[in-house]
Amino acid sequence: MRKGIAVIFCFMLICFLIPNCFVRKHSTENKIEAVDKIKLLLTETSEVIEISLEDYLKGVLVGEMPATYEIEALKAQAVVARTYTLHKLQYAPGSHENADMCDNVNHCQAYKSKQYALDAWDDAEEKEKWDKIEKAVNDTKGEVITYQGELINAFFHAHSGGQTEDAAYIWGQEKIPYLKSVAGNESYLFEDSKTFSKEELKKIIKEKYADYNEELDNIAILDHTISERAYHVRIGNLTLLGTDVRTLLGLRSTKFEIVMEEDKITLKTTGYGHGVGMSQEGANNMALSGSNYQEIICHYYTGVEISTYNH
C-alpha cells in the first residue's frame, strides 16, 4: 500500500516539475545575431529613424496590444515581438531599401511612439500604462523563442475564434512544427459580418478575376481547415482559397459562413486575424487565469524553448 502511494507521489512530483517548455541561456548552437539598434521606416512620413531594439519593442507593444491587458500577456507579446523582429532581420533582410523594419502592421509590426501613447491615454492612466509597457520589455530583455536552436517565425493575431490555425493552411507551405492548431483560449467569440448586394459582389470579384462568369447561385464553402476555417470557396466558375476571399472582401478572418438572401449575401466571421501563432486575446485570458508569459508562449508555439541570448 505504502509502495503504491509512493509511486503515485513520485509520478505527480515528476509531472509537476517537468515544464511544458524550457528556458535556457544562450549557447553557441543558437545562431542568434544580437541587434542593438534598428532602422525603422515610419510609413506616414517616409522618415527612417534609428532606435534601440528595446525602445522599438515598447512601441510595438503600444501598437499591437492594449496596455490594459495583463502584464504576463504583455510580456508574452514582448518576447514574441522580439523574436519576430530578429527572425525577420536574420532570415529576410533587405525587405526595405533603407530600413530594417516598418510600422505597417500588414508588412512588419505596428509601432507607435511613446509620445503617441501618452497623447492617446488619459492623463490619470498614462504613467501606469507606460510603466507596464516598460516592465514587459525590460523584464524579458534578451529573451527569444527558439525551435531546435533556431529563431521561430513568431506569428500572432488578435483573436483565433476558438482555435488557432495550422500555418500550412494559410500560406500553402509545408507544415511548420511549432505553428500547429491549438485551443485559442479566448473568453468570448469575436463576431462580425459584412453584407453585399449581389451586383456589388459580382463587381468586386470581376475586377480581380477577369474570367469570373458572374454567377452567385452556387457560392459555397467546399471544405474547411483543421480549425474550421474556410479552405476552398466556390464562387460561380471560380474556386478560391478562403484567404483570398478574406483579402478580396476585407473580412476579419477566414472563419466565416455564407448567408444567401434574395438580393444580397452576408458573410459572418468569427475571430480577427490570420489565426496563426499566439492569440492576443487568448494570451490575456490565460494571464487572467494565472498563466505566466512562458506558459502562454509554450501553449501557442508547440515544442519551443525560450532562450536568452547575449545582448
Image (cartoon, grey):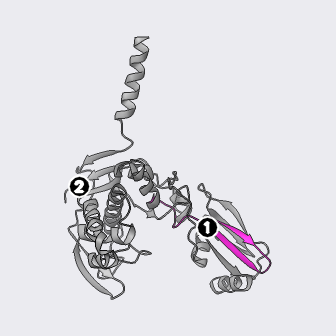
Q: Is residue 100 left or right of residue 288?
A: left
One can see residue 160 in this view: yes
Q: Which span is picked out in magenta?
A: 256-279
Query: Does the magenta-highlighted stretch encompass residue 263?
Result: yes
Q: Which mark is residue 188?
A: none
35 versus 261 height, above or below: above
58 versus 301 height, above or below: below
Work out whether mark 2 precedes mark 1 in sequence or the reverse, and give the earlier one: 1
| Image location of residue 102, percent across then percent down | 34, 77
Query: To which residue does mark 1 refer?
Result: 269
**Badge 2: few (under 14), some or many (20 or more) residues near its Cα, within 10 Å?**
some
Q: Secondary structure at mark 2?
A: loop
Disc 2 and disc 1: Cα gap in Å? 40 Å
| Image location of residue 130, percent across then percent down | 27, 68
What's the amino acid at mark 2?
Tyr
Q: Secondary structure at mark 1?
A: strand
What's the amino acid at mark 1?
Thr
Front-lying residue, 8 or 173: 8
Query: To which residue does mark 2 refer?
Result: 309
One can see residue 148 in this view: no
